[in-house]
């Protein structure tokens, strides 16, 4: 019973966070993403940057938060960490929601 309640509360928190993110104007942040991943998120100009269009929203939130905290090392990690370090959770949610809806 406790597990179900915790999962429900976690889901409600995520829903509130998504709703809050939807009200944000993240146009400037999306342009920063597009500089490397392309406006369509397909990274056709620089395939090593990774395709982010159509990724699961939860994955994008997770990975952006990992980059923000410096939790990922390797190819492009310095660039990504620098690109997202100023984003708050609502910005990350809005960006993830945007790219997750692209084909």
Image (spheres, rainbow, N blue to C red):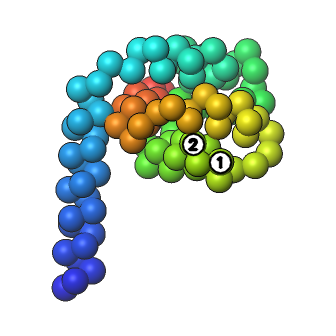
For the question of whether residue 100 can be seen, the reply is: no
Is disc 1 placed on a helix, strand or loop? Answer: loop
Front in this rendered view, residue 32 or 96: 32
Establish if 45 lies above or below 65: above
Which residue is labeled 1 in the image? 70
Q: Is residue 72 above or below residue 45?
A: below
Q: Position of residue 54 (x, y in %)?
A: 49, 34
Q: Is 14 left, or right, of 35 in this rendering?
A: left
Residue 84 percent coordinates (x, y): 56, 33
Task: Tell me the element at label 2.
Answer: helix
**Residue in the foreground of this view, choosing between 30 and 4:** 30
Q: Nearer the viewer, residue 68 or 34?
A: 68
User: In the image, is 98 to the left or to the right of 52?
Assistant: left
Q: Seen in the image, is 56 located left or right of residue 34?
A: left
Rendered-image quadrant of the N terminus = bottom left
Residue drawn at x 57%, y 22% as measured from the top left = 33
Q: Residue at x 27, y 44 (%)?
A: 17
Residue placed under numbered mark 2 in the picture: 68
Say which mark, if any, is on residue 55. none
Rendered position, 57 above or below 31: below
From the top left corner, tell me how far across and down residue 53 is, in percent: 53, 30
Q: Residue furthest bottom?
A: 1
Determine whether label 2 and label 1 are within 8 Å by CB: yes
Is residue 66 at least partly visible in the picture? yes
Whether 39 is drawn above or below 97: the answer is above
Query: At 51% from the left edge and 32% from the top edge, which residue is drawn?
Result: 86
Image coordinates for residue 68, horizontal then vertical, percent: 57, 42
């Amino acid at each position: 019973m406790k597990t179900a309640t915790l999962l429900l509360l976690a889901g409600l928190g995520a829903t509130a966070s998504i709703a809050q993110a939807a009200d944000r104007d993240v146009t400037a942040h999306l342009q920063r993403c597009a500089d490397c991943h392309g406006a369509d998120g397909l990274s056709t100009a620089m395939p090593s940057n990774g395709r982010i269009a159509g990724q699961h929203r939860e994955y994008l939130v997770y990975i952006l938060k990992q980059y923000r905290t410096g939790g990922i090392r390797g190819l492009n990690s310095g660039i990504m960490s620098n690109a997202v370090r100023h984003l708050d959770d609502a910005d990350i949610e809005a960006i993830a929601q945007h790219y997750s809806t692209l084909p």
